[in-house]
């Protein structure tokens, strides 16, 4: 449970401030919305003088995404087969090999047995079950289609998980090559180059500019290696700190969108994630405003997220969501906005968005497969340039030595 300080707007337009305890910011939105109020801004109040061990230990309390996918899929199948919720959870608790997940399932069984709704029990574990999971379960409970909602959750999470894996797989090859090249370069500067340069110096060979540059870099790494490492760590730390700030995150995400090849891929990834999440939530019966608010947290790029925030505000005013997406053609593709508009006109928004998600996920999948082919020439040029520079730096003094003989 977190403590929030907030500003909200009443239905009359009056702005007021207050404090409230809530499980997370979505719970805060929900509590205020029930009173007819709308959140303007909020800030989570952290307790001073206490060390939060959850921050440090959270890395050890994670449950793998694939396990959560299997949990939703298997639970849905068991409920569909006629098992009651408590018994189905008990089966999954005995089946799981994850100690962390076993503890969570035991807690869920205890809460459900006491009469707590499944969605309320899940909401106590926000680190494990994201808002989309809780919202879709709640909608399934309300409509009496919990088993079907769990299967939709499993499908949505599986699609998102597969998309993430394809992206990481495509980036793995260039990352490994670059890291290997840097490590080999450092080893050469420390062990190989000093020996050769020492020989040239003893023979009084005049060193060309490129060789002198290599010599200076080698000497710096050998004599001031720790200082260089500390400076690099400070620079990287400063960059990471700034990127995590709202202003830095906006600049960083904007730069990513302007990169060749990568920018258009990021655009399609965010579009696919928006379409898939919205489709899953709407098809499960979740309120459209809540669906858009939850989707805004799933989308990673802040510029795409701002569009969703505008869309949520437009819906509250009675406007069509597609109008906002039509005005943001530089971010969300026109195809997305048009399909959303058709869905709103026909009353099949969820189905239309599911089709859009399938299209962009397939396109991203194909582009990530081709990414290694696109990146490979740049890697070859980079490696070739580095090897050529070292070769010239070492060969030129040898030619000078031969000429002097």
Image (cartoon, rainbow, N blue to C red):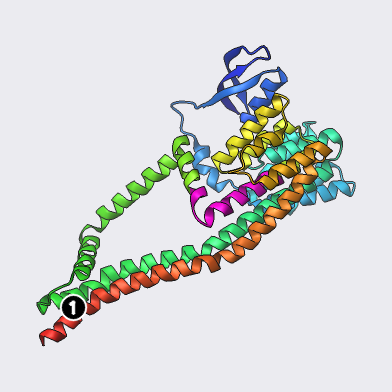
Say if residue 124 shows up in the picture: no
110, above or below 208, in the image: above
Q: Residue at x 15, y 81 (%)?
A: 400
Residue 179, percent from left and from top:
42, 64
Badge 1: few (under 14), some or many (20 or more) residues near its Cα, within 10 Å? many
264, above or below 199, in the image: above
Q: Nearer the viewer, residue 343 or 36?
A: 343
Residue 386 placement: quadrant: bottom left
Residue that numbered label 1 is attached to: 397
Of all residues shown, which one is farthest toward the bottom? 405
Judge left or right: residue 208 versus residue 263: left
Residue 383 placement: quadrant: bottom left
Q: Residue at x 58, y 28 (%)?
A: 2
Residue 307, percent from left and from top:
61, 36
Q: Quadrant of the C terminus?
A: bottom left
Most frequent secondary structure within the magenta stretch? helix
Total labels drawn: 1
Q: Quadrant of the N terminus?
A: top right
Judge left or right: residue 115 versus residue 265: right
Helix, strand or loop under label 1 = helix
Q: Which residues are magenta?
A: 256-276
The question of residue 5 being in magenta is answered with no
């Amino acid at each position: 449970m977190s403590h929030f300080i907030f500003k909200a707007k009443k239905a009359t337009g009056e702005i007021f401030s207050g404090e409230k305890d809530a499980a997370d910011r979505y719970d805060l939105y929900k509590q205020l919305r029930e009173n007819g109020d709308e959140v303007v801004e909020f800030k989570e109040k952290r307790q001073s003088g206490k060390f939060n061990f959850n921050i440090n230990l959270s890395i050890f309390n994670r449950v793998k995404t694939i396990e959560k996918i299997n949990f939703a899929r298997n639970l849905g199948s068991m409920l569909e087969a006629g098992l009651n919720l408590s018994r189905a959870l008990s089966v999954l608790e005995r089946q799981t090999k994850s100690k962390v997940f076993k503890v969570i399932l035991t807690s869920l069984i205890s809460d459900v047995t006491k009469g707590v709704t499944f969605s309320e029990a899940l909401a106590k574990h926000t680190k494990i079950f994201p808002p989309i999971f809780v919202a879709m379960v709640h909608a399934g409970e309300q409509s009496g289609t919990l088993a079907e909602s769990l299967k939709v959750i499993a499908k949505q999470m599986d699609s998102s998980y597969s998309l993430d894996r394809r992206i990481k797989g495509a980036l793995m090859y260039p990352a490994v090559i670059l890291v290997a090249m840097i490590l080999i370069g450092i080893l050469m500067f420390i062990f190989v180059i000093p020996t050769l340069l020492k020989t040239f110096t003893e023979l009084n060979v005049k060193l060309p500019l490129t060789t002198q540059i290599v010599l200076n870099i080698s000497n710096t790494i050998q004599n001031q290696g720790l200082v260089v490492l500390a400076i690099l760590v400070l620079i990287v730390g400063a960059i990471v700190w700034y990127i995590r700030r709202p202003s830095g995150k906006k600049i960083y995400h904007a730069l990513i969108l302007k990169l060749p090849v990568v920018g258009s891929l990021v655009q399609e990834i965010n579009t696919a994630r928006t379409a898939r999440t919205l489709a899953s939530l709407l098809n499960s019966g979740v309120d459209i405003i809540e669906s858009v608010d939850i989707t805004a947290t799933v989308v990673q790029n802040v510029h795409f997220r701002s569009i969703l925030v505008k869309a949520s505000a437009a819906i509250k005013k009675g406007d069509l969501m597609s109008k906002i997406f039509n005005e943001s053609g530089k971010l969300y593709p026109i195809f997305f906005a048009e399909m959303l508009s058709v869905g709103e006109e026909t009353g099949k928004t969820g189905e239309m968005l599911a089709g859009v998600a399938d299209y962009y996920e397939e396109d991203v999948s194909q582009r990530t497969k081709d990414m290694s082919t696109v990146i490979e020439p740049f890697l070859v040029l980079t490696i070739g340039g580095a090897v050529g520079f070292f070769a010239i730096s070492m060969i030129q003094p040898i030619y000078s030595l031969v000429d002097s003989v």
